[in-house]
Amino acid sequence: MRGAPTILHLDMDAFYASAEQAAKPSLRGKPVIVGGLGPRGVVATASYEARVFGVHSAMAMAQARRLCPNAAFLIPRFTLYRKVSDAVMTLLHTLSPLVEPLSLDEAFVDLEAGGTEPTIEAARAVAERLRADIKAVTGLTGSVGLAGSKMLAKIGSEQAKPDGLVVIEPGTERELLGPMSVRTLPGVGPATAETLRRAGIHTVAETREAGEAELVRLLGRAHGASLFLMAEGRDERPVVAERDAKSISVEDTFDVDLTDRTRVQLEIARLADRCVRRLREAGRSGRTVVIKVRRYDFSTLTRSETLRGPTDDPAVVREAAARLIDGVETTAGVRLLGVGVSGLADFTQEDLFAQAAQAAQAAQAAEPGQAAQAAHEAVGDAGRPPGPERPEPVGEGAGEASEDVEKPRRWLPGSDVRHAEYGAGWVQ
């Protein structure tokens, strides 16, 4: 851990809700709640106007509606959030080559690697300029923590919320951490916290006082020794510029348990297609297909199948997911389904043309004219860069009618529409 506060942690304030307020003038200054809107939906983000009523992330949406019935309840628009996130990450990369994104709205930055002088004054000046730049570019606010380690910088950004800056100066770490809950320390989840609670350990100070030997006895050598160092305020983890994703997955929770077998199979196919779109957006391919099934009684199981090689072919992923779900009993009721791909590899043109060749070979069994057409389409698909077949309909004008006159308008909560008098950004 460095002495100077040159590790910066940025955490955007109420990110999804704030992005919606910035995009839609009608929502500014009003409570906004983003998440799943069904009976089993969960709050992803609540604006600070909604938090006054007790609404918070991970709360059941039904409870949020009771606490704040007059809020704007919106479905997430991840295309918008990724666009804003890209703008923020671009600003962070101007500060240092070492930027470690944790999510769309959160990242660590090693300022010293970017040439910032290792002093409190220099680090504070950079952080203040960053906050001003984020406000100017996105219209949103972010909270910043500055410290000599990642753990302390993250604690600083939590204390700075909303729209603030906290610098944790060298020599103050132990005093700051002492009264905090042991859950503040990285790696302490519910199970570890319960083990420590049974031993009479509730705070960071009590964790430190217990000593390394006792923590090793309770938690094992690796976890216990690491936790003792954290309690001492020592965190040697570096900022890592590239955090390679291990898997890509999607899942849906259903308002009513699914019992119809055909419906389950259709949902698995739809999730497989969504997963492949995300895979292609990331420019990746994968070789292991995984399904997740949560039953009516909350029991959860996963099944996986490893392919002969990495793929980003939606048909291949759909078929593998279909085989996996065929082996799972679902007639008693399913509340959640998910499809994922792991064993990721860099997207390669060779993978695409191999898939095209397979499609052409399969088409040879058809009539001559059909085979030629199938091969032509397969090569055409192979030549396209990875990415979704159709962009997500969000942003300005997304709520307007499609050019396809046969498709009826579908107004979703949070869709952008253009008001005849007030312009874009009003909520249907």
Image: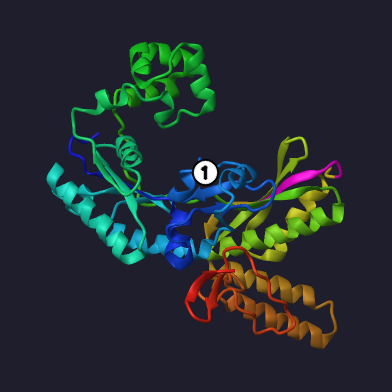
The residue at 58%/78% (across/down) is 383
Q: Report which quarter residue 263 is drawn in.
A: bottom right
| Dominant SS type (magenta) | strand
Residue 91 x/y as whole percent: 30, 61
Q: Report which quarter residue 179 is drawn in.
A: top left
The residue at 45%/30% (across/down) is 187
The residue at 54%/49% (across/down) is 44
Tag 1: amino acid: Ser
Left or right, 102 with respect to 284, comes to left
Residue 45 painted magenta: no
The colour scheme of the drawn protein is rainbow
Residue 338 painted magenta: yes
Tell me the element at label 1: loop
The residue at 28%/37% (across/down) is 149
Q: Which residues are magenta?
A: 331-339
Residue 68 x/y as whole percent: 56, 47
Above or below 329: residue 270: below
Left or right, 4 with respect to 328, comes to left
Q: Compare residues 173 and 214 and report the one nearer the observer.
A: 173
Q: Quadrant of the N terminus?
A: top left
Q: Is residue 299 visible?
A: yes
Above or below 217: residue 309: below
Residue marked by disc 1: 57
